[in-house]
Amino acid sequence: MIRGAAANARYFFSEAFRSIRENLATTVFTSITLGLTLAIFTLFLFVFINIDKSVTAQGDKVHILVYIRDAALSSGEKTFRGDALGVRGVKDAAFVSKEKALGILRQAMKGHEAALEGIDAGVLPASIEIRVADAYLEPAMFMTVVEGLKRLSWAEDVQWGREWLKKFSALLRFIEIGALFIGVFLAASTIFIITNTIRLAVYARQSDIEVMRLIGASRAFIILPFFIEGAIFGAAGGALSLGMLELARGVLAANVPAYFSFMLDMPLTPAAVAAILVFTGVFMGALGSFISTERFLKS
């Protein structure tokens, strides 16, 4: 049993490598096509991930100020922060004393300090500056946080940037919808190109397939060499895609403004990206080969 399985495995691999040698041009074309489509799709993912991170980071600018009643100041900073952090959706809460508020105002009016002469810190309210969790940045969810903060016994007033929140939410939705549409289109295009490219290799060996069918070979026996061949195409394509990706990143980095260069950053280590690309190439190559062979056998 073991010897028979080993003999079959040797046959499948030898057939796959024989086909690659005899159809070298098709092999090279298939690997390059697969590598190119993988590189394009991966570059899109890099850009999307980096833009998403950048936009999410902008969410920290959407903050809420909860002004504290003067009569409640004796309760202490820990009480205010603890109460605020207890509101669902609050990510962070920072206490801003009257003195710190005056310092911030002086910094904001640097160069016009004369306008603040005679102003005492006592006239400014102490406050808690709230940062909202990412999941609550959508306007409806954001308002639940605002309402929760308004119910705090020591809260005198609650203020937030309404216009900034609307613009941020609209931008976030636009990016998510655009990325979903482009991502689905690229993924479908990649699978379509790979499947139809590998089909060329299958049709190049249609006479071999017909012979195997005539002698009574099982579907699995016919498909497995092509499956292995597709995996080899995929491994080669995945390796090529890494080089193509680095070339594309280098060319784009030299031709885009510096403030857009962050979009080309690798979100993972080069080793992790290489491993993912090769694994994805193997998977897509094997899948494309399987689909193409199955369609051929059914025809």
Image: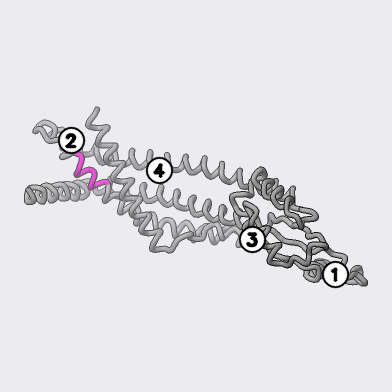
| Camera-side mark, 2 or 1 | 1
Which label was assigned to residue 92? Answer: 3
Mark 4 vs 1, N-terminal side: 1
| Camera-side mark, 2 or 3 | 3
**From this viewpoint, is residue 98 visible?**
yes
> Circle 1 sits in a helix, a strand or a loop, which is it?
helix
Q: CA distance from mark 2 to mark 3?
A: 61 Å
Which residue is at the front of the view, 84 or 170? 84
Which residue is at the front of the view, 21 or 64? 64
Mark 3 vs 1, N-terminal side: 3
Q: CA distance from mark 3 to mark 1?
A: 25 Å
Q: Residue at x 88, y 69 (%)?
A: 112
Within-10-Å neighbours for mark 1: few <14, some 14–19, many 20+ = some
Mark 2 vs 1, N-terminal side: 1
Residue 86 x, y percent position in the rendering = 64, 56
Residue, disc 4 = 190
Asked whether the beta carbons under mark 2 and mark 4 sit within 8 Å of each other, the answer is: no
Instruction: State which region is magenta.
Output: 223-230
Query: Count the marks: how many?
Result: 4
Q: Residue at x 64, y 45 (%)?
A: 141
Residue, disc 1 = 121
Residue type at numbered disc 4: Thr
Q: Residue at x 48, y 60 (%)?
A: 266
Q: CA distance from mark 4 to mark 1?
A: 63 Å
Q: Is residue 13 above or below residue 259?
A: above
| Camera-side mark, 4 or 1 | 1
